[in-house]
Structure formats: structure tokens, C-alpha cells
Image (cartoon, helix red, strand yellow):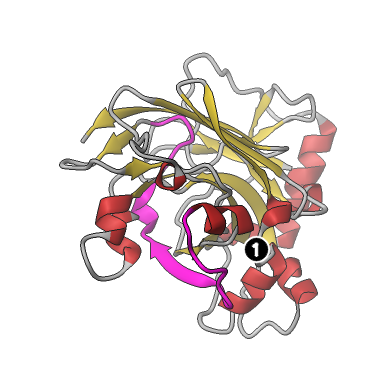
Amino acid sequence: MKLLRVGTAGAERPALLDQDGTTLRDLSGLVTDVDGALLADSAALERVRAAAASGDLPVVDQDGLRIGAPVARIGKIVCIGLNFHDHARETGAEIPSEPIIFFKAPDTVVGPDDTVLVPRRSVKTDWEVELAVVIGRTARYLDSVEEALDHVGGYAVSHDVSEREFQLERGGQWDKGKNCETFNPLGPWLVTADEVPDPQALAMKLSVNGEVKQDGTTADQIFGVGEVVRYVSQFMTLYPGDVINTGTPAGVALGQPEPKPYLRPGDVVELEIAGLGRQRQELKGA
């Protein structure tokens, strides 16, 4: 299933993308929201599947409709740095021996087509298309990749917007360059795990002002989705609705020759992952 949330910011309602790939169906009569509680409730998900198959769910009028982030009340966003071989090479970094973990605050999350704000005094705002993993079952001390994949509720497109000067040149950890307002567009859909049989075979692409910058695949990940979930569960408990951003392929501004083409107000970023949908953001000054 492709689950999503539609409506004005803060007042989104749950919906489903029909099998025709264009029609939206209203789920508000069946579930209160798309969140960790729903993902952890197999009976509720089965009711949604049955209603979707029946074709009886109300159609949503899409005229002027905003699409919000597909998951509500995210507990935490765990991010994996330098997780693609080609991205590590382009930035001159060593291949990590273990996953590099940092965090984004849930309040960085916005809808897939919402405005992204370039922070004040920013000169190095960068783009990163990423596969987001959404946890469906409480995960702690998982023993295997297979067990870890069984705890995944679904997948989504994530844009890990980053300010490289704040991240790398201002001392301390990476978090200053990762947690600026609007720095994690998510969606449009939460695609349930049963529709993504191999998360290591997903094409990823990002363009800026119509020019392709990133064109990669999750097959190039250093640590695959199952290993990332297993590894993270050794250090923290993952709850339904938590999100893991699993890294970005080569092509970010940081890895390009001088003058590096960092983002500016007025730029338009478009990104997509095969089967998971597309995002489009116009940048404005904060």
C-alpha cells in the first residue's frame, strides 16, 4: 500500500493512493492517522487493505491539495552518514568500518513539496536524496539482517538537506548543519514493506534547476537496510514510526569542484526513488 497524509500543515488526514496510481482515497473513516500506532497494528492494516481492495473508500478531491509528510508523530530520525561507496569517494572520506550515526529532530520534517528554507548566513546548503526506512515493530538487540527487515514497516523518499559549513566547519558534531528548519522533506508516500521486495535495488535521482546531480542506486550502500536496522538496534530501541535516513549517493555539492554549486533561494530541487514517488521543493531564504 501507498499511505499518505493530505491537507494543511498540522491538520493532515490519512489517505491511500489507489492501485491506479492516480486516485486518492480517504482513510479517515478507518484510521485516525498514519503513524507508529497504525504501523504496529496488523489488524488495522489488514482492514485498510481490505477496504482498498473493495474500491469503496471515498475519493479525495486533489484540486489544490497539499501532501504532507506520510508519517505523523515521528519519535526520532536516525541518520546514517557516508553510507554509499561513491559518496565516500567523492568527499575523500575513508569507507567507515561501522555505520556513522547522527540525528535529525522530528520537527525538521515537512511535506515533499513544501518550501525549504536556506538558513540565515548560510553559504553551503546542500542536497541529499535518501531512502527513509520507517520502523513498524519495536526493535531492540536484533540478531540478524532478516530479523531486522521484518521490523520495517515501510519506505519513503527523504531529502536530507544539509548546511556544510555549519556541519563541518563550526566545531562539535554534525547536528548544527542537519537540524535547520525544513531540512527533512519526507514523502509523498509511505510504501509498505511488502511492496518493496528488495530495498537494495532502488534507483535514486536528484536534480537542481532541471540538471541531474545525483543518479545512483541503493545497491551501492556500504551497509544495507537490514544491517543498518540491526546495527542501530544494538544502541537504542527503535519504535514504530521512527525513521532511519540511510545515506546518499554521489553527486552532492560538497563533492564537486570549486566553485561548489550550493543551493540558493530561488533554486528548485526535484528528487525521486523508484516506486516511492517524487518530491519538488522551491528554496527561499529563512
Q: Residue 163 in the image: state x and y as whole percent.
A: 31, 49
What is the quadrant of residue 118 in the picture?
A: top left
Q: Residue at x 77, y 29 (%)?
A: 56
Lateral position of residue 23 relative to residue 234, left or right: right
Q: Residue 94 in the image: state x and y as whole percent.
A: 52, 68
Q: Is residue 233 above or below residue 152?
A: below
Which residue is nearer to you in this view: 130 or 256?
256
Q: Residue 143 in the image: state x and y as whole percent.
A: 72, 85
Q: Is residue 36 above or below residue 284?
A: below
Residues rendered magenta in the picture:
91-114
Is the C terminus in the top left, top right, bottom left or bottom right quadrant?
top left
Residue 29 appears in the figure: no
Residue 51 appears in the figure: yes
Q: Which residue is mark 1?
A: 136
Q: Which residue is the extreme one toward the left?
A: 121
Lateral position of residue 186 relative to residue 163, left or right: right
Which residue is nearer to you in this view: 78 or 23?
78
Decide whether residue 93 is among the magenta residues. yes
Q: Residue at x 75, y 74 (%)?
A: 145
Q: Which residue is the extreme one toward the top?
A: 63
Q: Is residue 43 above or below residue 180?
A: below
Q: Is residue 39 above or below residue 129?
A: below
Disc 1 on helix, strand or loop? loop
Decide whether residue 267 is among the magenta residues. no
Q: Amino acid at mark 1?
A: Gly
Q: Residue at x 74, y 26 (%)?
A: 21
How crowded pointer 1 is (Cα within 10 Å; few <14, some 14-19, many 20+) is rated as many
